[in-house]
Image: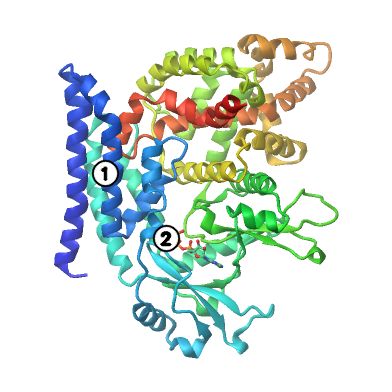
Amino acid sequence: MSDGARRARSRRILTFAARRLVQLWWFELALPKLGLAGIAERTRERRIRRLAEDFRTLAVELGGLMIKVGQFLSSRLDVLPPEITSELEGLQDEVPPVPFPAIRELAEAELGARLGQVFDRFDEVPVAAASLGQVHRARLLDGDADETGLRDVVVKVQRPGIDEIVAVDLAALRRVAGWLRRVRIVSDRVDTPALVEEFAQTSLEEIDYLHEAASAERFAESFADDPRVYAPAVVWERTTRRVLTLEDVTAIKINDTDALRAAGIAPADVARVFAEIMFDQVFTHGFVHADPHPGNIFVTPLPPATGRGGEEPGDRAGPLWRLTFVDFGMMAEVPTELRSGLRALVIAVAARDGKAMIEAAREIGVLMPTAATGELERALAELFERFGGMGFAQLKDVDPQEFREFGTEFGDVMRSLPFQLPERLLLLIRSMALTSGMCSGLDPEFNVWDAVEPYAGRLLDEERGDLARDLAAEAMKSAGLIWRMPQRVDALITKADQGRLSFDTSRLERRLDRLEGVARRVVSAVLFAALLIGGAVLVGPNPVLGTTLMIASALPLLHALFAGVLGRRGRR
Ligand SMILES: Nc1ncnc2c1ncn2[C@@H]1O[C@H](COP(=O)(O)OP(=O)(O)OP(=O)(O)O)[C@@H](O)[C@H]1O
């Protein structure tokens, strides 16, 4: 890229951001101060739509990282207004492929040989053209097949010059982050420079295919004992920093429900297994596929003789299919201390203990350490009092009006607090949002909370499992926790549970029993709570959206969280 082109590209991004910032300041800060908040209110929806359209135009024009940013925003199905997500959805499909001669040149330079010398066949038309690279089908030479006889491969080749484009885009994004740091309503909630650094790290990793190849192997290893999951083998001899050669694992696209049914596979089963496998990545392996969009997951039917694949664990007849993941360029690590923070949150919600929940939110980094949280504590106590005793199935029967009213009240408190978005949660939240969206697409009746419950139950059943052990340890550590619970919990759960609480047998046993008893229901509740808080801070990364969503945060958030439940209820 010439110096001129580099400068023009950078200028285009910076001008776009500067204009939107000024607009944000004017409508969301200046006008309300002048007593004209009504104007901001009335024009907000139109402005958001316009912003999404303009961003789309910019991304399509510039390609590179801007497509990634758009993809990122479009995956926020749970919190962003549909006018944004629908505008940005499918953005990656608009990327034109690089003409084959340029791809050939790069691949040959990387592999140090002519394509004809190392591949028996190399399709000139790509299977997929993405923002950073494109994928071509190929066939290895006879003698190059590995011991399994693997010859059919896909070769992912980087777009020529993408390193430079990424560098220019990151420099521009860093400047925008610096500006945003000076906008208090944004900087109160999100450390934008840190966020951009996180994005930078992910993007730089994504253009290092050796890193992706290593991640593919790590992912495969973590599921080595789980026949429901598969990842393509890496052909290391034909892999470099810019060329990645993988086993071709093309099968049924996970969202192709017609093809699934034709193969005798129930989409609802796929949704359930998929959610479980994603939870396994978060809670068990701590290594999570952060881009689980439909193009990256196949359902592979297996011949009955194989006896391996998806279906009920322990199914003696052997599962009939498995989920095959591709694209390991973007992975989220869940470090041990983050997992422990999430668990602390589980315990706190188990105890319906708003105070402990707030502490856990601090530990996870969602709530700034200095936040004065008395009000939030009171609001949470009320939340638990009203809805806390119900499983998610029961929540279906709550009058939507009641949710709405509570959302309005709760929203005031949420807005007044310095929530922030720790960058380490970014990929995890993205991954979970995509998971939830995908599962609802496969099964309209799917409710992520229903999936969490049996999952949590299974975790707890593994007596020696980490979670069970930690829960037990936690229960002992926080002596009194269980006993405090009945006082805090609403009448429903109190009545249901008091009968089971007895003081005349071993206290510890009772505590653990009690904890296990509620934990299944509670792990789902905690995710609800975590998303409630997490969702509120998601508003940070984009200034205009940030303000808009902060202003209307709680209601859409609650609505988004319960949309499936309430929607279904309404249709009944
Ligand atoms: N091993 C494979 N076997 C079959 N198809 C594959 C394989 N790897 C990738 N593909 C196909 O190529 C598409 C693009 O590959 P991949 O997602 O790895 O590229 P990417 O540049 O990261 O794209 P994106 O940013 O859209 O995820 C995938 O969505 C999938 O449909």
- Which residue position holds label 2? 205
Question: Residue at 56% of width from left, 81% of height from top?
Answer: 139
Badge 2 amino acid: Glu
Answer with left or right where residue 394 lies relative to residue 80: right
Answer with left or right where residue 435 lies relative to residue 109: right
Answer with left or right where residue 476 lies relative to residue 85: right
Question: Residue at 69% of width from left, 25% of height from top?
Answer: 476
Marks 1 and 2, how far apart in space? 20 Å
Residue 352, image x, y percentages: 60, 19
Disc number at residue 152?
none
Q: Secondary structure at mark 2?
A: helix
> Badge 1 local density, few (<14 within 10 Å), some, or many (20+)?
many
Residue 154, image x, y percentages: 53, 73
- Which residue position holds label 1? 177
Q: Secondary structure at mark 1?
A: helix
Q: Quadrant of the N terminus?
A: bottom left
- Give 348 or 384, whichever is nearer the viewer: 384
Q: Which of disc 2 and disc 1 is earlier in sequence?
A: 1
Compared with 86, 370 (above or below) is: above
- Give 197 or 430, whichever is nearer the viewer: 430
Residue 374, image x, y percentages: 44, 14
Question: Residue at 27% of width from left, 30% of height from top?
Answer: 44
Badge 1 amino acid: Ala
Residue 39, image x, y percentages: 21, 23
